[in-house]
Image (tube, helix red, strand yellow):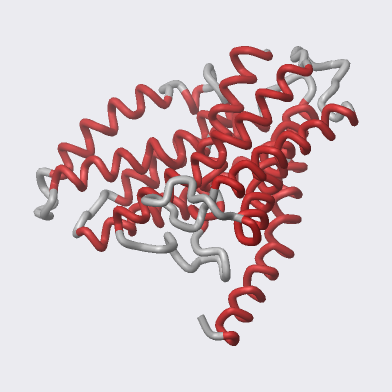
Amino acid sequence: MTNVTSEKSMGGRTLVNALGIPAILFFIYLGDLAFAGFVAVVSLIAIREFYLLGGNRQIYPQFFAGYVMTILIILYYYFGPGNPLTIVRPGELLLIITVLVIFAEMFREKDNSLSNITNTLGGIVYIPLLLGTMVGLREIDPIDPTLGMKLTFCLFVGVWTCDSAAYFVGLNWGKHKLIERISPKKTVEGGAAGLVAACVFFLIIYKLDILSSQYSMAGIHSIDYIIFSIIIGIIGQSGDFAESLMKRDMGVKDTSSFLAGHGGVLDRFDSLIFASPVMFLYLKYFVY
């Protein structure tokens, strides 16, 4: 990469960070439909990027089915069970859409029908079903909505802290490859630094007692902060490797060039795709 290209990439990355991070934090603060709408837009862009990855392998997913399912799943996470708009649960929606996608494929006259079907359904599971849990996390506490805000804040900032530490340490001191066949540049040192950074971040959150609430049904204890650190520091980084595995299989470096200097939306949310559902389910079944 030339110096000029490198400078442009760094400039684009800096601009995206300067605008994107405050905007995301603002949507987290707003919560409600504003944050749900933000996650819906991110998910729609991400599933489009995911579907376009198959172009190099002559895979033709059903975009419309993916878009419709994305909206329906985000609505479910926002309204929750019992609302007339979410009378059908995500698992039941997947049963219905599986039949419809296979049925529609019979009339599309496209090659690689099996790959088209599995790619369509895989995108629905991978993007909105997993990433949509950010909406569920933000709305997890009906009694004290500010706790959902703080938990979502911790999810995002924890992932950013972990990723930044892993990148910085890996770039400067990384010697031992972590999973070279998937991501040759990622190192053991970088991965360990990301985990340590996540632990330090949640130690600060614990010491400052940020997640305490006198109104919430939840009781967040010291062990929960350790679990949060593991979710961000290990499972979150696994999400990065999972996306790298898919990109390598499709023969691409970035999912798109949507975000200057960062690649695609999917590239920026890969860690959250794994960390968010695990944190959401942990809180839902073991804390609340």
Q: Is residue 253 above or below residue 206?
A: below
How far across and how far down the image is residue 142, in percent? 72, 21
Res 89 visible: yes
Q: Where, by quadrant of the figure, is residue 219 drawn?
A: top right
Image location (x, y in percent) of residue 288 = 68, 13
Report whether residue 38 is seen. Answer: no
Which quadrant would residue 94 be assigned to in this image?
top left
The residue sitting at 61% across, 27% down in the picture is 279
Q: How many marks?
A: 0
What's the residue at 78%, 27% (across, down)?
147
Left or right of 214, for residue 15: left
Q: Nearer the viewer, residue 247 or 169?
A: 169
Is 242 placed above or below 86 here?
below
Up-down relation of residue 74 to residue 223 (above or below): below
User: Residue 71: where, in percent of width, then height?
Assistant: 46, 41
- Horizontal and vertical percent for residue 15? 69, 70
Left or right relative to 101: residue 40: right
Is residue 230 or residue 78 the one in the foreground?
A: 230
Question: Which image quarter: residue 148?
Answer: top right
Q: Residue at x 37, y 55 (%)?
A: 247
Task: Identify the residue at horizontal 69%, vertical 62% (top origin).
Answer: 17
